[in-house]
Amino acid sequence: MSTKQPTLRARFGYILLWSVISAAFIGPGTVTDAAAAGASYGTALAWALVFSTIGCFVLQEAAARLSIIGGLSLGQALNQGRFGVVGAVVFGCIAYEAGNLLGAYAGIALVVDLPRWVVLLVLGFAGVS
């Protein structure tokens, strides 16, 4: 029994794909916040890591129960809600962009001392244009 090994190009493609997905998920705001928190508080915030891990487990478990019992994926269950696909997409876009703006603000605030509303207004206009 021989299994075909992926080529170097295919392996590089897998690495590139998951690297892009990881970078999009983590984002600059997460890196900035984690660096600032680590520099300021050290290991005093280890409880937040434990709490977020437990919260992630609970949410994943709830989604798994929904899939097993209801026969629906999480996306399908959300689609059957009141707002449907359009509402879910709009809400997702707003939440994603809000996270990007706040992350960019956190990074800029480490370099420039400007009021929050000025930075967010400039970033908001930059995102629209």
Image (tube, grey):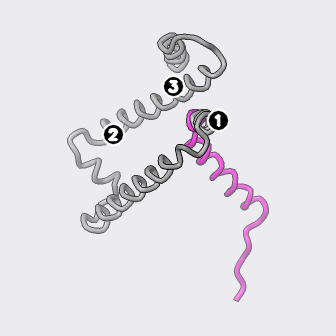
60 relative to 129, above or below: below
For the N terminus, which image quadrant?
Answer: bottom right
Residue type highlighted by circle 3:
Leu
Residue visible at 61% across and 33% down in the picture: 40
Residue visible at 28% across and 65% down in the picture: 71
Q: Nearer the viewer, mark 2 or mark 1?
A: 1
Q: Helix or strand or loop: what does disc 1 sit on? A: helix
Q: As drawn, which residue projects farthest toward the right?
A: 8
Residue that label 2 marks: 88
Q: As drawn, which residue projects farthest toward the left?
A: 82
Q: Judge left or right: residue 81 versus residue 31.
A: left
Q: Judge left or right: residue 74 versus residue 20.
A: left
Dots 2 and 1: beta carbons under 8 Å?
Answer: no
Sequence order check: which comes first, mark 2 or mark 1? 1
Residue type highlighted by circle 1:
Ala
Report, in whole angstroms, how far the alpha carbon at label 2 lies from the one at label 1: 37 Å
Q: Where residue 2 sits in the image (x, y, percent)?
A: 72, 85
Q: Nearer the viewer, residue 98 or 37?
A: 37
Q: Nearer the viewer, residue 85 or 121?
A: 121
On residue 101, the disc is: 3
On residue 39, the disc is: 1
Dots 3 and 2: beta carbons under 8 Å?
Answer: no
Q: Where residue 5 sits in the image (x, y, percent)?
A: 74, 73
Specify the segment rendered in magenta: 1-30
Q: Nearer the viewer, residue 49 or 56?
A: 49
Q: Where residue 75 sits in the image (x, y, percent)?
A: 35, 51
Which picture quadrant has residue 11?
A: bottom right
Sequence order check: which comes first, mark 3 or mark 1? 1
Sequence order check: which comes first, mark 3 or mark 2? 2
